[in-house]
Image (cartoon, helix red, strand yellow):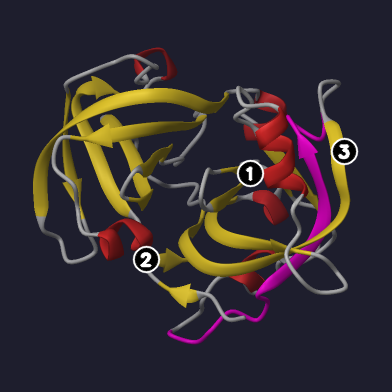
Amino acid sequence: MRPHMHGDHDHHGGGDAKGFHGMVLWGLDSVYLSHLPMFKAPPHAYQVIVEADLARPTGGPATEYATDRAQHPGQLLYSLAAEEFVLPDILPQAGKPPNLSALRGALFRNRFDQETGVDIAPDVVVDIKNVIHGRKFDPAAAELKSLEYIALGRPGEIYLAHLITRPPDFDHIVRVTFDKMPAEESLRSGMMLTIPTLRNEKDERPAAGDRGVSATLSGIDGHETAVEVTVVEEVFFNDDPNDLDE
């Protein structure tokens, strides 16, 4: 299965080494994964978000994730401890399909690298069907003045993932609703959402229950739409310097 090539995938994959990559995994009807980045560790100096299907190594869908979610209805966060691979190999390059479209690894409830992590599937295949965002960190990146997020998902299941740029920074994923629904294909491609009234600081991030947050939503065509955001729940937050490597 080859991922669709949506959005802006700006990266420089030459010379990147293989590594073990941890990913946050979440989603209701769809499954999304976000790479856990580290600024100062070259193999991990990427923000990558993909939509995927979970399969068994022998073929057919892997059902452990859906089953575990049904058994733990309040559980939001899952994670994947992926086997070694070169991270930019899963990103489209210069208009060409990615070199790698499937990963293998172990699936955990909560984070795999913390005491609360529970191994629910020791060997699953992640078939990447849509690369939403992929970007290598630029040490000279300008500081963001306002909060910016990558909007993704489908109608009825929309998420915001904080745009990570330069240290110190934070990883943050929330499920939201908009007062105006963008086109489904635009969401699948990944859109940029800016909250101009909030500074790009962790203490100003939108929280569960926030309503009427004024924001600007823009797609890859550059068209901007004013929207009001309601935060349904927080899926993930992390500002641990051992991960983000301040």
Residue 89 included in the magenta stretch of the image: no
Q: What stretch of residues is rendered in magenta? A: 95-113
Residue 110 included in the magenta stretch of the image: yes
**Mark closest to the chain's N terminus, 3 or 2:** 2
Amino acid type for the residue under numbered disc 1: Leu
Q: Are marks 1 and 2 in contact (CB under 8 Å)?
A: no
Q: Is residue 61 above or below residue 81?
A: below
Identify the disc placed on residue 25: 1
Q: Distance between the residues labelled 1 and 2?
A: 22 Å
Amino acid type for the residue under numbered disc 3: Asp
Q: Which of marks 1 and 2 is in front?
A: 1
Residue labelled with disc 2: 8
Q: Distance between the residues labelled 3 and 1?
A: 13 Å
- Residue furthest bottom in the image: 96
Q: Which of 36 and 32 is in front in this view?
A: 32
Name the residue located 49 percent from the left edge and 67 percent from the top edge.
130
Q: In which quarter of the image is the N terminus?
A: bottom right
How many residues crowd around disc 1 within 10 Å: few (fewer than 14), some, or many (20 or more)? many
Q: In which quarter of the image is the C terminus?
A: top right
Q: Nearer the viewer, residue 124 or 20?
A: 124
